[in-house]
Image (spheres, helix red, strand yellow):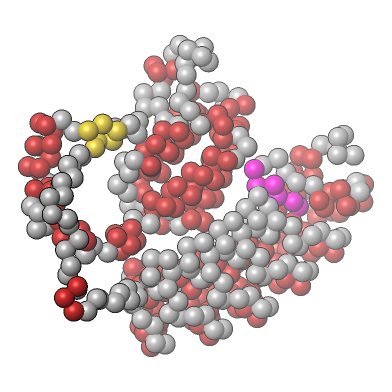
Amino acid sequence: MQGTYDRSRWFELLKHGSIEEIRAELELVPKAFLLSLTDNSQSRHTCIFFAVQSENVTRGNKILEILLNEGADANYKDALLQTALFYSCRYGHNEQAQMLVEAGADPNQRDTYGQTALYYASREGQASTVKILLANRADPNIVDNLGQTALFYSSREGKLEATKMLVEYGASINHADKTRNTPLSWAKKSGNNELVEFLKSKGAVDRLGKNKKEPEGPQKKKDTKKKGEKKQQCVLMIVDEKGDKRPLSKDEMAEFERKYPDIAKYWKDTNAADELDNMDLEALEAKKPWDKLGKKLLNTLWRANQAWVFHEPVDPIKLNLPDYFEVIKHPMDFGTIKKKLNSNFYSNTDELLKDFELVFSNCKLYNPPESDVVTMCNQILALYQSQIHQLGLDALRYS
């Protein structure tokens, strides 16, 4: 059956067909086959995912009810280990969320980011959906890969009602993530003063400090430098647009020191070097969360089935594309992005994401819309767009 049935027919009916046409297809084709059929996208979605993503919510509710009654698996997990419950909760489709939970969908299923459906409802501020999940034994204190709970996401996005619901159901208000930030830390960044005051009224504290024990006595400030020890030479490296490194020349070094005396002091002034030992490196890392998230994004895209076409720069000679550089003025590929990430070339989220988007726009600019490579590009682009939202990178953009 799988070899002869045109699966696009089934998914087209789910997208645009009438309820009667969908019922007729379920009668015509073995139900077990249709209900377990996955689409051709990277996401590997079954029929119930199409139901919860229907633009017409009433229609989606009806289709989902039919599919679940026919035996569709409410706990089926897609390529990101997400069930249809994740999508219904993100969109705030309460009736669908309730149906899925009653059909056996696990409210505590974790996706590849360690997050549950509760995270997505909380981030979008779907307070009534949050309540449905919590009332159905969703755990508000599950910790994701960043060490954060759902409360961090509702706080970061300034979603007051969702935050109140989470706190009411026992969310740990002073849990600290891997950067020792608490929900209050993120709430302050949201600009929602009412939310900040609410968390404070519940006993919330700001970012947790280090618990360092200072040594006592004469060893407190023991100098660890040995007599006669050679000082390390400072070599400043520059990273070009291709991610390649080279040391600065003497003239370039002199120009750098002139322009950036606050940095140059660390190798010109021996006393200033002590400041480096007292720097809170984790606090500095917390100021650029996009760095680790960007590497996670790259790793996910790199492993996608169709991504091999973007792993290396386009070779016009090997591929017989003599006009490639006439059309594409700014080439980009995932391998170059990886080099630039590992070399700390990017200074903000925008620079990183613009390079990713340059890969996709170059592909679409040079290749015909109906070509295989553009089809592959669209699949990776869809995964990219989903990932930057789920990782929160879109919220860290300046523009």
Q: Is residue 205 left or right of residue 368?
A: left
Span shown in magenta: 42-47
In the image, is residue 233 above or below residue 32?
above
- Quadrant (top left, top right, bottom left, bottom right) of the N terminus: top right
Please identify the residue farthest to the front as the structure is shown: 227
Residue 205 rendering spot, x and y as whole percentages: 36, 81
In the image, is residue 342 above or below residue 174?
above
Residue 396 rendering spot, x and y as whole percentages: 38, 55
Q: Residue at x 22, y 79 (%)?
A: 216
**Closer to the camera in the image, 290 or 13:** 290
Count all numbered tags in the image, as a single digit.
Answer: 0
Instruction: Tell me if residue 98 is in the magenta stretch.
Output: no
**Closer to the camera in the image, 250 or 111:** 250
Q: Residue at x 54, y 46 (%)?
A: 300
Residue 388 rendering spot, x and y as whole percentages: 48, 51
Instruction: Tell me if residue 46 is in the magenta stretch.
Output: yes
Secondary structure mostly seen in magenta is: loop
Q: Residue at x 70, y 40 (%)?
A: 40
**Residue 96's image quarter?**
bottom right
Q: Residue at x 20, y 39 (%)?
A: 235
Q: Does residue 91 appear in this view?
A: no
In the image, is residue 44 above or below residue 83?
above
Q: Does residue 40 appear in this view?
A: yes
Residue 44 rendering spot, x and y as whole percentages: 69, 47
Q: Is residue 393 left or right of residue 245?
A: right
